[in-house]
Amino acid sequence: MPERGKKTETVPVWKALKLVSAAKAVEFGVETESPIFVSPNIESQQKCYECHKHFGPLVYPTGREVRAHHSHLGVGIYYNIGPIDLNYYEHKLDMPFFGWVGLLGERKSKWQSEVRTSSRVCLTRVLAFCKFHGSHEPLDQGYLIEGGGELSPICEDLTNKYHSNVSFLFRIEEDHILFSQI
């Protein structure tokens, strides 16, 4: 519910993302030579509980519209409106946070935060946060650790601790991310 007397303010519209390796993407049926961003909670083909239509993970390229495989009341692409809350998925939804947030724009809102669905979104920018430090400051560059084909950002402070799992360096520039394999 909107807070009484609270002014409308511009807040981010965002979505948690998961970065997967090219090999993992091929398992999803996506041919690629580099890592890609996908839906954080859809690992394989699934069946809609309402209409029984099959759907799979969506790929989120920066600057392009992404359309849900299908949508109806309560089904589609989930996104958040409000301050970026890094603990939202783990503490409120009991789902892991992979360190990536996709910005979908901004909206004016009196709400503290809310979750909505849409049949389509456009990813404008990706932010990286250290998966283990939970810092609220996004990383401009860092390292990626790999586990099960998933690539999560970590800050430089943790590279010694996780050095055997570090597979890529990344650097975020404007609206794209550069990867360098180690």
Image: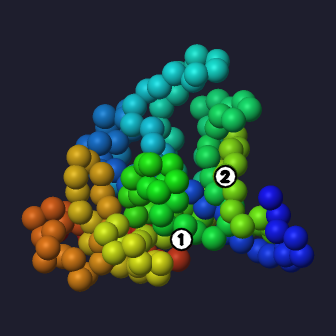
Going 50% across and 49% down the picture, which residue do you hit? 93
Could you say which quadrant of the image residue 131 lies in?
bottom left
Residue lying furthest front? 4
Q: CA distance from mark 2 to mark 1?
A: 24 Å
Position of 147 compared to 115: left or right?
left
Is 67 situated above or below 3?
Answer: above
Visible residue check, residue 39: yes
Amino acid under disc 2: Val
Count neighbours of disc 1 (C-alpha within 10 A) and say few if under 14, some if 14 to 19, many if 20 or more.
few
Helix, strand or loop at label 2? It is strand
Residue lying furthest right? 5
Residue lying furthest top? 52
Amino acid under disc 1: Asp
Which mark is first along the chain, 1 or 2? Answer: 2
Is 143 situated above or below 152?
Answer: below
Label disc, if present, on residue 49 of the rendered structure: none
Dot in front, 2 or 1: 2
Going 47% across and 81% down the picture, which residue do you hit? 137
Q: Which residue is mark 2?
A: 115
Q: The C terminus is located in which quarter?
A: bottom left
Could you say which quadrant of the image residue 124 lies in?
bottom right
Position of 138 compared to 171: left or right?
right
Position of 173 compared to 82: left or right?
left
Residue lying furthest left? 164
Q: The N terminus is located in which quarter?
A: bottom right
Q: Position of residue 62 (x, y in %)?
A: 54, 60
Model colouring:
rainbow
Label disc, if present, on residue 175 of the rendered structure: 1
Visible residue check, residue 105: no
